[in-house]
Amino acid sequence: MKDIQSQRDHRRINIQKVGVKDITYPVMVLDKAKKLQRTVANFNMFVNLPHRFKGTHMSRFIEILNQFHGEFDIKNLRLILEEMKSRLHAESAHLEIEFPYFVKQKMSQANGIGIGEYQCKMQGLLQENYELVLQISVPIAVPLRMQNGAGLPRSPGLWGNAVISIQYRNFIWIEDVIQMVEEVIGQNRSITEQRNSESSPQAEQFSEKSILSVEDIAKALGRRFSGNNDISRFSVTVENLCEGFKTFAVLDGPQEHVSTG
């Protein structure tokens, strides 16, 4: 019987991605207030497979991950990609890390300090050059209000999300990105509420869902990130959770071009 595995492959077929995905792993990420924050991340690790290689040892991905003991910062991400590319004889290496990030925030005088949860993703690519994209999903909530000035406050709800993807020019903290987004959303909400209350005495009867605009928020976020010298490129996606469907607006920077749906 012929040993097919040992024969040379003359078809010259390249595989673009081969690797492992959905690895759950405890990690420590940089925290502006506490230096490090412990969380649990989901990993996808893959490389390209040139035609001259018939396969790769999948266990090597886990070995590389274990080598860094779950301690991840911007420098380590590049080191992991370099190790993947070297040990697996690849021309390009990719790494995706998705994790929840928690930030203390002041809720109100009555509720005191709360914890905000933000879904984050880091995507690294090492080919001839190194690229790193940080993605943060920031919830946009309906604020608490009193109904007719009496009774229990209306329960807070989720209006939608602002998903920010950025490429660094200089290092920037996750907390600082979140703060910029929440400041812009708060300013946009205040301006919109003021305009509606001036134009219609009944405006305050409507919910936040009916007066916030995905286009206005996307443009406002675009202006904010365009003025930040630490960010070279960014993408903003603002989603509103309507009944039965979603509306959205996408803006890529530094050019302010908005597409909506």
Image (cartoon, grey):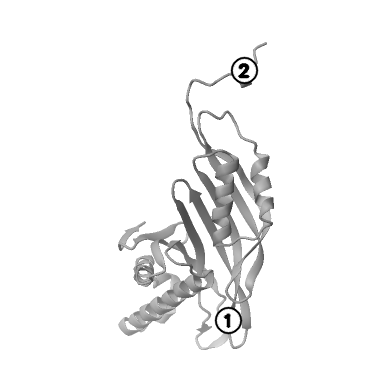
Crowding around mark 2 (Cα neighbors within 10 Å: few <14, some 14 to 19, many 20+) is few
Q: Is residue 195 left or right of residue 20?
A: left
Label 2: element kind:
helix
Q: Earlier in the sequence, mark 1 or mark 2?
A: 2
User: Mark 1 or 2, which is nearer the eye?
Assistant: 2
Distance of label 1 from label 2 (alpha carbons): 65 Å
Residue, disc 1: 107
**Residue depicted at x 50% and y 67%:** 138
Which quadrant, please, contains the N terminus?
Answer: top right
Does residue 172 appear to the left or right of 45 in the view shown? left
Where's the C terminus, which quadrant? Answer: bottom left
Label 2: which residue?
Answer: 4
Q: Which residue type carries mark 1? A: Met
Crowdedness near tag 1: few (<14), some (14–19) or many (≥20) residues, C-alpha within 10 Å: few
Q: Any mark on residue 175, and which?
A: none
Outermost top residue = 1
**What percent of the width, then of the height, locates residue 102?**
61, 70
**Rendered position, 146 above or below 26:** below
Q: Is residue 241 visible?
A: no
